[in-house]
Image (tube, rainbow, N blue to C red):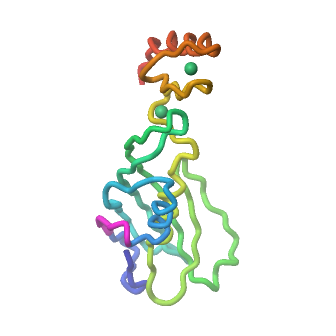
Amino acid sequence: MKIRVDDIKEQPRVLRSEEPLETFPGLVAVQDAGECGFLSPVTVELAVAREYDHIRVKGNLKTRIRLNCSRCLGDFEADLASVFTMFYRKEDRVAFDEEEVELAEEDLISIAYQGDEIDFAPEIAEQVIMELPLKPLCQESCRGLCPTCGVDLNEAECTCAGSSFSLKFSALKDFKVDK
Ligand SMILES: [Zn+2]
Ligand SMILES: [Zn+2]
């Protein structure tokens, strides 16, 4: 996902593509480390426009991943999506005051570029990594493993001393929240 700086005008230009994982060495490393598995290419849409002294890139991305639940240790699949705005400035101007307007629920990133071409791949990989949960849960109500006997409490009850705790959880299980 590269663009020549000369091709960026005030009128936003939209770039759309499905990028294979190999485009993002940072994500290949995450996958190799076993943190998550990427099950689909990364679908990226960027609107690139020149603005004052910088280049504004509004983007969104999505992909499908496989994670390992931090409670029950089971694998599960999830959609990963991110909406972000990035500002690119020519490297010698980065010292400028950074007074960005805070946009709700969006990540604002300021990046320096050199030369006459911008490669968006490193920042896109960064966005994906920021969206990875620190403590993945297969479901919000995952009951995890019994710390005593190791049984998966989502699938079976056990009779360990801690079972009063799990009884409390089974009562909660019937409590449904409308989203
Ligand atoms: Zn789980
Ligand atoms: Zn148990």
Looking at the rendering, which quadrant does residue 145 occupy?
A: top right
Residue at the (43%, 84%) spot, across then down: 5
Seen in the picture, residue 76 relative to 20 is either above or below; the reply is above
Query: Quarter for ligand 2?
Result: top right
Residue at the (32%, 69%) spot, across then down: 15
Of all residues shown, which one is farthest toward the front?
149
Which residues, given as a range, are shown in magenta?
Answer: 14-22
Horizontal arrangement in the rendering, residue 135 relative to residue 74 (left or right): right
Q: Main secondary structure of the magenta part?
A: strand
Q: Is residue 85 visible?
A: no
The quadrant the C terminus occupies is top left
Q: Position of residue 177 (x, y in %)?
A: 45, 18
Seen in the picture, residue 9 relative to 131 is either above or below; the reply is below
Q: Position of residue 58 (x, y in %)?
A: 44, 62
Of all residues shown, which one is farthest toward the bottom?
115
Q: Is residue 126 visible?
A: yes
Seen in the picture, residue 31 relative to 7 is either above or below; the reply is above
Residue at the (62%, 24%) spot, across then down: 148
Residue at the (49%, 66%) spot, across then down: 29
Residue 26 drawn in magenta: no
Q: Position of residue 128 (x, y in %)?
A: 47, 58
The foreground one among 138 and 166 is 166
Residue 19 drawn in magenta: yes
The foreground one among 119 and 84 is 119
Horizontal arrangement in the rendering, residue 64 relative to residue 170 (left or right): left
